[in-house]
Each structure stands twice: as structure tokens, then as C-alpha cells.
Image (cartoon, rainbow, N blue to C red):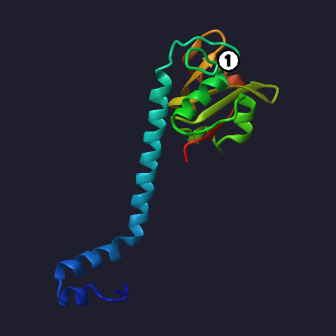
């Protein structure tokens, strides 16, 4: 049916139920895309939460340079291992993950599951996964630190705040 038909004409035809359904679809078409976008955002948030949940199962695992799991991890080995579980292949180094993997996102747009990068003198040297947003641009992230193993840290700590270099979103 053409969308130029009036609802009154649709209702006057046989098959009133079908006509009402068609009319409802025609009337809601603009808002359906809004519903679809909201549904997609919720699905993306759920994926991020699943990534975080899985990453947390490795809390306390020891750090080892070159470790790529499941018993030991370095920082990029940890992010690779976690994302591989969900079907994503990341580059093996924190520097390459920062340069090539995902879509860059601003600090104010971070979501759980996003990768966050840290370094000094303009060079990325560490990577983690956002676990929660704390407000005012601050967040918690899970990572494998050389002195801590897999742990959750706060971006508001001076050490991390001074070294923050950016973020990317793997889950699209």
C-alpha cells in the first residue's frame, strides 16, 4: 500500500486489523529508527559488560613479559586474550593496538569494554579495558601491570592520569 493512503481509507477497507497494522507501521516509521538505534546501543553496552565480566575472571593472574594467557599475561597479551574469546583479533603490542585497533573515542564517550592507552613522551606503552565510568571523565580499568598482575585501577590516580594517551572502541 502507498503511504499516501489515509488511515480513514485503510480502516474502511476489509481486513480492518491488517489496515490498522499497516497504518501503525506507516505512522511509526520515523520513530522506528530511533528504537533501533536505542536497541543497538543497549546491545553494544551488553557486549561491553560481557567483555568486562570475562576479563574479571583473570583478576590476580600474574604478570609475565610476553605472557598471553591463560596463566600469565602482559598488558597487551591480556587484552588480546580477552577479545579473542569474543572473536576479535587485536595486534599483539599496546603500541599497535593504539595505532591500528578499533575506532578512536574521546574520554567523555568511554564505555565499558573500550581499550584505554597509557604512555610517556608520546609513545603508548600500556593498555587496559574500561570496566566502569566514574564520572568527570574518570573510569576504572582492568589491566595486567608488571608489579600487580591483572588488577583494576582508577584513572584518577596521578600515575595513570599523567600517562593517559587515548582510547579506542573495538565493539562496534
Residue 89 horizontal/vertical position (percent): 62, 38
The residue indicated by pointer 1 is: 159
* Residue with the most extreme top position: 147
Image vertical order of residue 99 relative to residue 123, above or below:
below
Residue appearing at x 23%, y 88% in the figure = 8
Q: Residue at x 44, y 28 (%)?
A: 53
Circle 1 packing at 10 Å, graded few (<14), some (14-19), many (20+), is few
Where residue 66 sits: x, y (%)? 70, 18
Q: Residue at x 70, y 26 (%)?
A: 118
Residue 150: x and y, percent? Answer: 56, 16
Q: Quadrant of residue 127?
A: top right
Q: Foreground residue, 2 or 156?
A: 2
Q: Toward which corner of the image does residue 23 lie, by quadrant?
A: bottom left
162 w.r.t. 21: above or below:
above
| Residue 48 percent location from the top left of the image | 48, 37
Point out the residue furthest to the right here: 121
Above/below status of 65 relative to 23 = above
Q: Nearer the viewer, residue 3 or 68?
A: 68
Left or right: 163, with 31 as reference point: right
Amino acid at each position: 500500500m502507498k503511504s499516501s493512503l489515509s488511515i480513514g481509507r485503510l480502516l474502511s477497507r476489509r481486513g480492518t486489523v491488517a489496515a490498522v497494522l499497516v497504518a501503525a507501521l506507516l505512522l511509526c516509521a520515523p520513530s522506528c529508527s530511533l528504537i533501533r538505534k536505542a536497541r543497538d546501543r543497549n546491545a553494544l553496552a551488553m557486549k561491553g559488560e560481557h567483555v568486562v565480566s570475562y576479563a574479571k575472571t583473570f583478576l590476580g593472574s600474574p604478570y609475565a613479559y610476553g605472557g598471553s594467557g591463560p596463566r600469565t599475561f602482559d598488558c597487551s597479551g591480556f587484552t588480546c586474550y580477552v577479545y579473542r574469546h569474543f572473536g576479535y583479533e587485536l595486534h599483539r603490542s599496546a603500541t599497535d593496538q593504539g595505532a591500528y585497533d578499533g575506532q578512536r573515542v574521546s574520554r567523555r564517550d568511554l564505555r565499558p569494554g573500550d581499550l584505554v592507552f597509557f604512555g610517556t613522551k608520546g609513545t603508548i606503552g600500556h593498555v587496559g579495558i574500561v570496566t566502569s565510568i566514574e564520572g568527570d571523565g574518570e573510569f576504572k580499568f582492568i589491566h595486567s601491570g608488571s608489579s600487580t598482575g591483572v588488577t583494576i585501577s582508577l584513572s584518577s590516580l596521578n600515575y595513570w592520569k599523567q600517562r593517559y594517551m587515548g582510547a579506542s572502541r573495538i565493539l562496534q
